[in-house]
Amino acid sequence: MTEPGKLRNVAVAGHRGTGKTSLVEAMLFQSGATNRLGTVEQGTTVSDWEEDEQRRQMSLAATLCHVDWQERRINLIDTPGDAGFQGDTIAALRVVEGVVVVVSCNSPTGASPCTCRSVPSTR
């Protein structure tokens, strides 16, 4: 069991299609929590395990994963980016100590309105 002082809770948030699930997958792989790097396109990620998520290639609910890194246990909450599922994102932001906000560099407008509405919920 992890000591409370060595436990961190972090949400991964941002608008749809920015790579939140891919980032969580890479973190799991780099930490050694998984032995393969799954992809959203192939439906092989740890956090998008439901058939509907794999078919749509998007997260429909927040998913909890964890990595052990530098003698710390980091609970990662992969949140949905679509505005239709924003409730799970807002709920996750209320229970974490930190947030990794993922913004697409391919978007001509930067952060989407959905991202801008979700992030203030962390206050």
Image: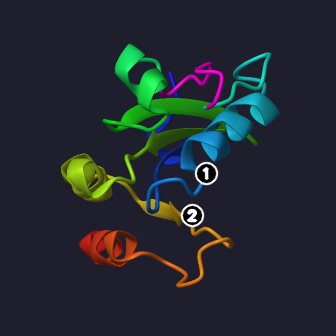
Q: Which residue is mark 1?
A: 19
Query: Element under label 1?
Result: loop
The answer to whether residue 35 is above or below residue 12 is above
Range covered by the magenta-colored residues: 41-48
Which is nearer the eye, 85 or 13?
Answer: 85
Which is nearer the eye, 69 or 22?
Answer: 22
Where does residue 86 sit, x and y in percent of width and height? Answer: 24, 54
Query: Element under label 2?
Result: loop
Side (left or right) of 13 relative to 87: right
The quadrant of the picture occupied by the C terminus is bottom left
For the residues bearing labels 1 and 2, Cβ distance under 8 angstroms: yes
Tag of residue 102: 2
Q: Is residue 39 magenta?
A: no
Where does residue 117 sit, x and y in percent of width and height? Answer: 28, 75
Which is nearer the eye, 94 or 49?
Answer: 49
Where does residue 12 sit, x and y in percent of width and height? Answer: 49, 53
Residue 90 placement: quadrant = bottom left
Neighbours of disc 1 within 10 Å: few (<14), some (14-19), many (20+) = some
Q: Residue at x 39, y 54 (%)?
A: 81
Q: Amino acid under label 1? A: Gly
